[in-house]
Amino acid sequence: MFYYGQFIGLLYVDAGHVGLAQKEVSPLRRQLVLAAVAALVAGCATLVAGCATLPAIQTGASQSLVLRAKDRVAPALVHVRPVKEVFQRGKREEVSVVGSGFIIAPDGKNGGRYVVTNEHVAGESKFVRCVLFNKEEADATVVGIDPYTDIAVLKFDGEQGKLPYVTLGSSAKLKPGQVVLAMGSPHGLARSVSMGIISVTDRYLEDRGEEMVSPFNTWIQTDAAINPGNSGGPLVNLRGEVIGINARILAGAENVGFAIPIDIAREVIDKIIKEGRVSRSWLGETLQPTRAKTDDPAQKGVVVADVDPLSPGYEAGLRPGDVMLAIDGAPTDARYEEDLPAVRKRIADIPVGTRVTVSVLRGGKEIEVPVTTIERSLLKGNQVEFSEWGFTAVDLTATMVRRAQLPSKKGILVTGSQNGGIAANARLHSGDIILSVDKIEIADLVAFQALYKTVVEAQKPLVMLQVKRGALTRFVLVKQGEENGPQPDTASLESEGGSANVN
Amino acid sequence: MSTSILAFVLAVSAAQLDDGFQTRVIQEAYDRYTPAMCLVTYTAEITNPTSGETTKRDNSSLGLIVSAGGLVMAPGHMQLENSEPFNISVAVGQGDEEKKYAARLLKKPDDVNVCFIQLQTDDGVSFPYVRFTPGVPLHVGDPILLIGILSETMDFSRGIVTTRVTAVLEKPRPTYPIEGAIRYGFVSGPVVDCEGRAIGVVGFDLTSSEGGDLYVRSGHPLVYQANLFQKYIDNPPVETSEPGGEEAWLGIFTQPLNDDFAEYWGLEKRGGLIISSIVTGSPAEAAGLQPGDIITQFDGTPIRAKLDREVIGFTKLVRESEIGKPVNIKVLRDQQPMEFQITLMTRPKSARDAGEYVDEVLGVTVRELTTDVRLLLNLSEDVQGVIVRRVKSGSVANLARMRPGIIIMNLGDHPVASIDEFKAAIEQISADKPDEISAFCRAGAATGFFRLEPRWEDNAGK
């Protein structure tokens, strides 16, 4: 995606198993982190000095405030240990990770007992072991997830009797400087509490087209110690109300943590409990603040930076460069990037399939564009292992289709292949997009699964795939029943070197 | 008794020498060729192909003077698709006699991985040079003598290594791998046979990731026989800044039709070239060739590629065809033979030959979008702009957070599809002196805007 700001290297804060840990300190990300640190040091020297102050609140009357707030939330704190499904090197594996969570009030209708945590903690898991504050264990299952806000809701299995729960506060009127407590399991150490203040209430973290996006909210930034394992744990005010969900830290920095504002989370939690999922409207737009085009404060609206060619917005005639002034008459102003999440959320909150009128400014004229929204694609596609061939693949999301510049959403993306496997021998590798099998176009993962099943069961000796990588396509011949030794010279002269092989 | 033992020992060493090099030959070769050996130092500007960011690194390698006029042959790795040498300086002679010369890089040959450099001298200087003997046959096990330079810690002294031809590969052209690990200082050094003749140089082929296509024997030291490069010594290549000879272009990417593919399609005749991709805007596209078509004949020449490296012959055939004259291409489509008359075009400019423009107003260096970059970045034809190569630190563009790799499509209301349009836009902007310019750009697959705020007073002061 398009990003124009400084790099911010972020880490998820689930403590965890080695695989994830390795993934998160990949060289690339480390570079980004360094870049971010350099930028901060260069840009604002006071930031460097700011972390040494200890709140005076630790003494006297203030002490009782902290104790009271902690006591109100702590009993509902949960140490979350999901068994997650991960896809690595062409294989599906299960790994145990550690995170945090908290019990919320029972659902009025069914009386179910729910735990809130992060999607990156409990997503892709069928089984979650929870350890309660009293050290008792209880198992839970995932009710629903929302990767766009990084929220997951779990439900305890069976009867749980009386359980303590937290009070959800409001994040609307938070102030920087306000004292907060972060609670959870840093590095897997359950029942931990740390204290700090709110550093910034509306931190904008750029959508960089990676997994860690949160396009619909700004973040609460705090200096309360947050570490890997704190993910999903509550950020609490001195009244003992949950005002945020801790989810990110700035890697390499000291005490720069980020929490999802509870007002955003509350809506998502409610939707997950009611409907099991969160659906959002999509026009295909990428937005930038008006500042990206002009510093003129009289310029209202928000800049349309990009329009996905396979979107209703594009079909309706929205184009990059348009300034979106209003939707159905309600203004969509974003002068600063911090204003963007609210505008994106406005669009997302439109019921899917609604016909709206988008007012845009184009070439000095205001025009109205009627457009019917469609549902926003999932952030992550379904992933499956194909064990006979030794590879894993995922359904294409709108973002992937855009990035690969495919003419349609047809195809699946290879996410990994096992060394020595049939797929790897045919030189099918992570990043390849499979377009067809034996000349039959593949619509999606389900369609591929069906075709795959047929050819595997029939033990067809040769299966031909058409594969796209970057701008180029190639043919891949899969030799079933040959697991050892790569085939020489199957193809892929063109996979590297760009122009080198243009004949 | 003792004399007979002595005789025996002598006999053995004589036999060993017969099979290899006589000390006299080594000494003579050393004396003859080392004066023509020189040390090439240069700075390489290395471009990250995805981000366009550049880094600079100082390097040195062996050079071999191959003409009295100061033509120097150096390792081909000096000049790669994403690495351009500059500040080239050549030290000729050793110790007190060492003399440094500035040098110009010439256009790199595309059929052998060597570079040519022309020493810049006051007129009349005549250099000692190596005269090659082309066409000397080589066999497995033939002993050869290599002369090179040792490392900096050894004062770049000249040194020798004797080794043997490890194997003889016949296709696609005769190739002679040599034994053992060869130090970098021996690459491009003379290869001398038992009779003291310089029969070639030590070379390394390019890997495909280094931009190699004609050279497919990468990763192993080879003897580049003199036949491969003598033509460049006789007719030195033009300078890099001048456009090279035009080559014909069809605009396809191919895969060899190996036995498995032939079996899959039930083809009896083995060999051929499968078209895997077709470049937009190419003659192949205009003629209606399709991915999956199998080329069996090109202008009367049967195409029988089964292995990757056999594609080379076809590539060469296309490149050397006449531009603008129709060629006959026979293909199999769904097992059915078809024929196409295709008029080849001039091969589009590559990024290396593309024009660049250093702009002082915004602080960016931009380059035109070439076909190879379009393919690399997966850009469709409707993306028209210039690509940012460098952003000057502290510049207007830097402040706006522009970065290398971004494609500028519009500056304000001015479309900038070419360097000329970019220059014109900058001129217009410099005349208008707006407070801010909105640049419409593309990064990866997505588009967006950058707001640039030119500092007019700064520029006026310059």
Image: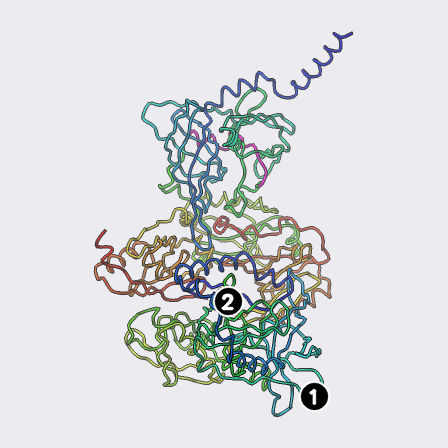
Determine if the magenta segment contains residue A449: no
Say whether residue B233 is magenta.
yes
Q: Mark 1 is on which residue type?
A: Gly
Q: Give residue B56's position: percent from left, percent from top.
A: 43, 45
Q: For the residue carrying disc 1, how many other residues have a C-alpha within 10 Å: few (<14), some (14-19), or many (20+)?
A: few
- State left or right for residue A17 relative to residue B389: right
Identify the element where label 1 is drawn.
Answer: loop
- Whether residue B313 is visible here, answered yes or no, is yes
Residue located 64% across and 54% down the image: B261
Q: Which mark is residue B388?
A: none
Q: Amino acid at mark 2?
A: Asn
Residue position marked by numbered label 1 in the rendering: A161
Q: Nearer the viewer, residue A497 or A220?
A: A220
Q: Say whether mark 1 and mark 2 are on the same chain.
A: yes
Q: Is residue A380 left or right of residue A218?
A: right
All told, the count of numbered labels is 2
The residue lying at 41 percent from left, 60 percent from top is B381
Q: CA distance from mark 2 to mark 1?
A: 38 Å
Q: Is residue B72 above or below residue A144?
A: above
Asked whether the beta carbons under mark 2 and mark 1 sit within 8 Å of each other, the answer is no
Question: What residue did someone put label 2 on?
Answer: A255
Asked whether B384 or A276 is in front, the reply is A276
Rendered view: B396 above or below A394 = above
Identify the residue at image location x=47%, y=24%: B130
Report the residue that reaches farthest toward the front: A60
**Residue B47, position as x, y percentages in the image:** 44, 49
Magenta residues span B219-235
Identify the chain of the residue marked 1, using the numbered disc in the image: A
